[in-house]
Image (spheres, rainbow, N blue to C red):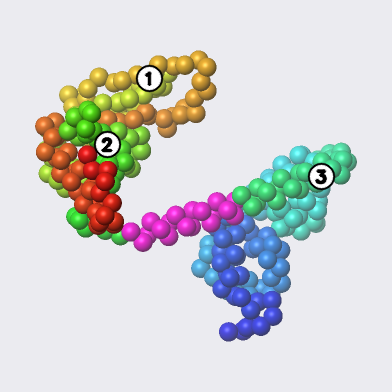
Amino acid sequence: MAHSTGKYADFEGLRDRAVTLRRAGLSRRQIRDRLHVDNNDILNRLLEGEPPPAWTSRPNAKDDLRAKARELRLEGWTYDQIQMELGCSKSSISLWVRDLPRPERRDPTEQARLAARKRWEHELAVRDAERQESKAAAASEIGALTDRELFLLGVGLYWAEGSKDKPYARREKVQFVNSDPGVIRVFLAWLDLLRVERERRRYAVMIHETADISGAERYWADLVGADSSAFNKTTLKRHNPKTVRKNVGENYRGCLVVNVLQGAELYRRIEGAWYGIVGAVRPSDLSNRT
């Protein structure tokens, strides 16, 4: 490989950084300046296969750059700052913004704060790109689930989120509560695997009284594919004026309760399977069996 020594010796590491920056929305010039890559051939190889961000695409790229340059100029940015941000020449910037008023000279400490904020915004974008890449890679490793894998997964989910029988309160019933639609979908797929008939499933919504109650009821009914006859009365959580709620917004839909009618035998199977999992991990650690 060319340039096997010198500042391009760690080519793969440099490529990983370049790809991360590209996916965070940086232009070639910005990546070049960030990574100090002054060789166009090397830069081409680093970005091979990575499409440019939408804002740099032709035919509207120059128009978008011009609009962004004018926006930044109106915010008080200097030519040097705009050039560093957008990666275009000062002559182009001068042509685009020459009709705008010259920005007032800022306090050096304010300029330093603005520069630091901009660097931090770029850093956040890079970190977010890295997070999304890690999540996508992990998701791609899963593939299809076998029936055994889904069975064990469902047992673990239930033991974390489902109701449990206690020596002091015998209640061998199957009741599962969660607010995550993905968790609910997995649990329902698990019930399908165990051939729990749809007629034995009952649902109920638990939600704060100030939320969009009817919208939440429709959402959960659509998700589980059941009509109103399968739903019990919605449980409302009363509002405490001293509490600042964080579970607000259009994505807040409360929790869904899933009950299985005549579920005592299924509960016993779940509990037995769970302790089988515990025993497989640590055969001697069965002291919490109820």
Q: Nearer the viewer, residue 260 or 59?
A: 260
Tell how many labels.
3
What residue is disc 3 on? 111
Q: Nearer the viewer, residue 143 or 56?
A: 143
What residue is disc 1 on? 237
Q: Which mark is residue 130?
A: none
Q: Nearer the viewer, residue 246 or 172?
A: 172
Q: Earlier in the sequence, mark 1 or mark 3?
A: 3
Under mark 3, the amino acid is Gln
Q: Earlier in the sequence, mark 3 or mark 2?
A: 3
The dominant secondary structure in magenta is helix
SS assignment at label 3: helix
SS assignment at label 2: loop
Residue 226 left/right relative to 134: left
Q: Quadrant of the N terminus?
A: bottom right
Q: Nearer the viewer, mark 3 or mark 2?
A: 2
Q: Is residue 221 visible?
A: no
The residue at 14%/34% (across/down) is 263
What residue is disc 2 on? 162
115 in magenta: no
Under mark 2, the amino acid is Gly
- At label 1, counting other C-alpha atoms closer than 10 Å, the crowd grade (few under 14, some 14-19, many 20 or more) is few
Which span of residues is magenta-colored?
125-142
- At label 3, counting other C-alpha atoms closer than 10 Å, the crowd grade (few under 14, some 14-19, many 20 or more) is some
The alpha-carbon separation of the residues under discs 1 and 3 comes to: 49 Å
Answer whether labels 3 and 2 touch (C-beta < 8 Å). no
Residue 232 in picture, x, y percent from top left? 22, 22
Q: Is residue 284 above or below residue 170?
A: below
Q: Nearer the viewer, residue 158 or 181?
A: 158
The residue at 22%/28% (across/down) is 169
